[in-house]
Each structure stands twice: as C-alpha cells, then as structure tokens.
Image (spheres, grey):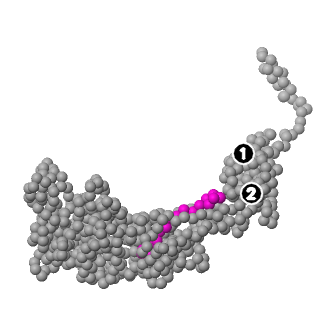
Amino acid sequence: MPRLAALLVALLPLAACDSGFGGSPFDNRLPETELSVRSVDLRDDLGDRRLVSTIELAWSGADPDGVIVAYDVRAYVVDAGLPAPGAEEGWARTARRDSTILLPIPEGRRTADVAVEVRAVDNDGGVDGSPARTVFPIINSDPTFRLTAAEAPPDTTWPVLSFAFTADDPDGTANLAGVEVALNDTLSGWTRLPADLTFVTFVAADPTATGTVDARVLAGRTAQTTTLTLPGLRMNAENRVFFRSVDAAGATSRAAVYPDEDGTLFVRRTTSAVLLVNDLRSSTVNVDTRPLDVMRDALAQSGVGGYDTWDLSRTPLVASAPQTSEALPVTADPTLRLTFALWSRIAWVSNAVTNSVVGNNLPLAAPVLGGFFDRGGRMLVQTPITAPLAGDEGQTNPAIDLLPMAGLVSFAPTSTEPRTVRTLRANAGTAVTPAGAMPGTSTPLPALAATALVTTALPYAVGPDDVVLYTMPFTAFYTNNTNGPWAGSTVVASASSDGRVALFALPLFTGAGALFGPATPGGPGVTDALATILDGLDFSSAARRPLAFRSR
C-alpha cells in the first residue's frame, strides 16, 4: 500500500490506547490593528495647520490564530479638560474597513483635538488591547445658507409662504444641526427646522386674523404637517423672514433675509370664503375690466356681501414671451394648492384660458385644485373660448380638463364637410337660448341675445357628464369665401353634473357696448344669468359660513 496509508494504519493502534499525551489548547491570541494614518499625533506633523472636522479613515487588522470579524471605533476630544473615556466606553462596532467620520467639536468652540481609536475584533471575541490611535487637530468651518430666488414668494401674498433653500457645511452635511428661521424679530429667538429640509411652507394658523399670529410649519414639497409653529407673522402688513443654518458645534451661517432692503413682502389676510380672481390681462396696461364689474354685480345680486379679490392682471400677457402672473406663487404644489384652500368658492374672470398652456394662469392652477373641490369647493369661470396659438394645438391644457367641456371645436375639413372653416360669426339679434337648468337651483336661466355682430365667441364640445346651460347658433365662413350654418357644437355655457364647476364662455363686451343683453327689452340679462349660476354653486350661503371652515 502507499507509504502514507501504511503510516496511518500503523498509528491507529497507538491512537486507540492511552498514549500518555496530555495538555490544553493555546489561549486565544489577540488581534492587532493598524490605521491608514500612520502618525500617532498629527499635531506634531501639521504644526499650526488644522483639518476640517470630517475625515476619511481606513484601517486593517490581523489575527495570528483566527480571522478578523469586526472593528470597534471611537472618537473623543482630548484637549477640552475632559477625562478620557473608560476602556470600554464609546465604542461603535462595524464590519467596515473604512468610513467618513465626523469628529466632535464641543459646542461653542471653533477648534478641537480629537483622538480616533480603532481596535480589531477576532472570531473568538478577542479585541486588540492596544488600539490603533491618531490625534487629529481640527477646525470647525461655518455652515452656509442660500435661498432659491426663483421660488421666493411674490411681493404681495396671502398667508401661505413657501421658501426653497440650500444649507451646506464645508465639514460635511452630517455636521449640520439644522436650519433656523425667524419672522420679523430675531431677538425673540429662532425656530429650528430639520437639517435635511430644503423646502418649507408657513401658513397662518388663522388666515382671517388681524395683527400678529403664529404660522404653522409644513415640511417639504409634500407639505407634511409638523408640530412646529413660527411666531410673529404680521397680517395685512410688511414682513421679513430670516434664515440661517447651524452646525453641530453651534456655528451659524450669515443670515439670509427675505426680502432684501429693496423688496417687499406684504401678507394679506382673508376676509371671506369667496374669492374673486381678476385674470383679465393684455399685452399693454390697458385691459378691459368691465367683465370684472359684471361679475361683481352678479355676486352682489346672488347675496354675496363681501369677498376677497386676487388681482392677476398686472403681468402683461405677451404672446412672444408668455408668463404667468407674478402675483401667483411660482410653486403650484404645494404653495398654490394650499393658497386656494383658504376659500370655498372661487369666481374666476379671464380673457385667456384655452389658447395656450404656457403663460395663462388657469392652466397653472387647474392641476392643484383637486383638494379645493374635495373639500366642497365650487367655482365659476367666465372667459371667452379662444383657439390655440400656433404651436399649442397638440398640447394638453389642464384648464380644459378642469372645466365642464370635452375640448375645443375643430375647423379642419372632415369627410362630411370638406371645406376648412376660417371663422364663426353670429349676427346681432342671435338668440342665446337656455338649454337646461343650472344644477343646485330652481331659478330658470334668462334668455339672452347678441346686441351686435359677434366675432369673438367660440362654442366648445361637452362631455356626457356635462350639463349644457346655453347654446347659440353660428354661421361658418370658409376659406373658399363661402358660408353656411355651423354644424358643430353650439354650447357656450355649461356646468358639471355634480355642480362643482361652471363655465360661462360668452365674451361680454365689444367696443363701447355690451355684446349680449336681454332677449326682450327690460328683461333679465347677463348679470342675472351669472347670478343664477352663482346661486346654483351656493356662493351666498358659503360666504355666510364660519371662516374656520377654511383653516382646516
């Protein structure tokens, strides 16, 4: 047989009897540890120089009779008159062999000498009795803070204010302790926000209050509720908001102030559950405000004694450079969403809604009105329908999705009508006929009629769940210089079947005169029609409800 096998066989009898061998296993031999920084004390190597408080450190270990399974790491200040920790105090165990470590600096101090110790742990639980150790001389750097100007509040705002910002620290973001904010007065103290916050919204605890009130703090772009409150919000007055970041050592950034000395931040209180939106804009400062006057008369006639007004008309509506009103918050969600939650009824008067998504105000607001409606909100929009601008034809317009309409009519040729429509017109005297009752009221809608040649009105298509309120026939003028009765939709006013939103799409004025009036002299006219629709939307009783309805 092979020699190795023969040797094993020869040894078997010896193993089977008492050979006289004895003893005990060796004691576990402890591991050794090394740091990537070979110096025991960097103070000797750096002289007067100091490091930032965040360091990158690696380590390794060796065990003569086993394997390394973990490392214990600790860091502590050695220059502050503090006793060194006990032999088994302050250790954190990790399987990693490197880490980014934030070294501690006592609060209020700018410099510190910090010892970092690492000891290897073997598979028998033995630890290095002489941990690897290095002393790091460090200096704390002040944190930084910057407001995002593009998302700052407008110069006049309702009591919902959002801010986006960036806080940072040269010593590492882990060294940030928080962001602090104060309203109007820093001497009374700061309110600390979480260090990882980059967006915050302040909402007046009582949006109807006068004087100074607390503001609720909502965290992040999802506006998460917090337990924090911010004192000192001045209602119907100018405000200043102070921000700064603070680090773990108590150092702070320079305060950022909004607005600066050249700006204003006027916070308006609300006075009613009803909001009238003036969205009448033009490319010049001269805009026809008469439709707004008609809506005011209709509100009064429907029993709404008082309402808030939001003026969006100051920003010119220029086709070559469209932009939404500067009076609106830039951030639709959550800022605009939370702002609309301040009211339960909205009357929106506009002259540009359906012709473009970019630049028009209602397409910006429409996607965030879901919460307003879910809380029982109702809305009347008075605006003429206008065809999309060049380049906007294929875009999805959120305002069209919001309103009780299925879409705009098409002038393109079809198999049944091969001619292309150039324009629609209606002659003076054309009847505007009530097609049904406004949901929510038993008051009949008045019959109306055109008082002059109508060239600025367009009908629109409605869906199966929309209630048609008014129709008007049109004459189609084609590109081949022929004309004839328009065969498409004739709807010019409608409401949703659930009574939440209504659309009155007749242009109200031409030149010096009203474009539509009573069907019979002395009869009810456009103001009466709008008042009836407002009644169906329950504007008057909403205006009489306790204002606390809006603060929930």
Q: Is residue 399 magenta?
A: no
Report crowding for label 1: few under 14, some 14 to 19, many 20 or more residues within 10 A (C-alpha). Answer: some
Residue found 78% across the figure and 15% down from its top: 1
Q: Secondary structure at mark 1?
A: strand
The residue under label 1 is which amino acid type?
A: Val
x%, y% of residue 552? 43, 74
Residue under circle 2?
49
Q: Is residue 475 visible to the viewer in this orientation of the structure?
A: yes
Q: Which residue is at 10% across, 70% downward?
A: 428
Q: How far apart are the alpha carbons under marks 1 and 2?
A: 36 Å
Instruction: Identify the residue at the far right of this view.
Output: 20
Q: Residue at x 16, y 63 (%)?
A: 490
Give the magenta-colored segment's residue range. Answer: 157-173
Name the residue tied to disc 1: 69
Contact between marks 1 and 2 (CB within 8 A): the answer is no
Residue 293 position by quadrant: bottom left
Kind of residue indicated by mark 2? Arg
Report helix, strand or loop for mark 2.
loop
Residue 467 against residue 159 in the figure, above or below: above
Q: Depth-wise, is mark 1 or mark 2 nearer the camera?
A: 2
In primary-sequence order, the first of circles 1 and 2 is 2
